[in-house]
Image: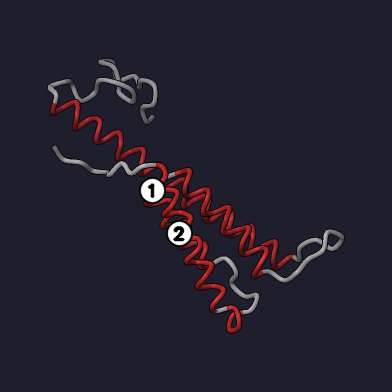
Amino acid sequence: MMVLMRRESAAARYAVAIGAVLIAFGMRYWLYGTLENRIPFSFFTLSTLIAAWYGGLGPGLVAAVAGLALADYFFLPPHSPEQGVGDTERTAIGIYAMTNTLIVVLFWRLHTRLREAEDRLRRLGAGLPAGSGAGSRDSSGVPGPGAPL
C-alpha cells in the first residue's frame, strides 16, 4: 500500500517545532552584532515553515508564537508600556503574523488533503467505493460533510 504521509507522534512533531525555533534563535543571536535590530523575524519564519511542514497545525502555531515572543524580547528595540511599540516594529510584527499564519494554514490544508487521499486509497484497496465516507459527494453530486465545494 502506498503511504503519502508519515504519521509521527505528537511528541516528535512538537520536538521538531521547538528544535527549529531554538536553532533559528541560535542563528539569529549569533548574528546579532551584525544585524542588531534589523530583520528580527526572518529566521523564525523559516522555523515556522519547517514546523508546519513536518508537524501540521499545532506545531506550526507553537513555532510561530514562540518565534514572535523570542524575537520581540531579544531582537526588537526595548519599548515601554507608556510608549508602546513604534510603527516600524508594529509593521514587522504584522507582516510576521500574516506570513506565518498563511504558512501554517496552507500546510494544514496540505496535511488534510493528504490524509483524505490516503483514506481514499485505503478504501479502494479494501474494495469500498472511493467516494464513501466523510468528504464525499452523494449520487446526485451534493457534497457530504467535509467535502470541498
Residue 50 x %, y %: 41, 57
- Local crowd at mark 2 within 10 Å, few (<14), some, or many (≥20)? some
Q: Quadrant of residue 73?
A: bottom right
User: In the image, which disc is placed on residue 52?
Assistant: none
Q: Classify mark 1: helix, strand or loop.
A: helix
Identified by mark 2, the residue type is Gly
Furthest-top residue in this view: 139
Q: Amino acid at mark 1?
A: Ala
Q: CA distance from mark 1 to mark 2?
A: 10 Å
**Location of residue 5 in the rendering, given as x and y in whole percent from the top left corner:** 27, 43
Name the residue at 87% across, 60% down. Answer: 82
Q: What number is the disc on residue 19? A: 2
Instruction: Say which quarter of the image contains residue 66.
Output: bottom right
80 vs 98, nearest the viewer: 80
Above or below 14: residue 132: above
Q: Looking at the picture, tell me which residue is in the foreground, 3 or 114.
A: 3
Classify the position of the C terminus by image quarter. Answer: top left
Q: Which residue is mark 1?
A: 12
Q: Residues within 10 Å of mark 1 (few under 14, many from 20)?
A: some
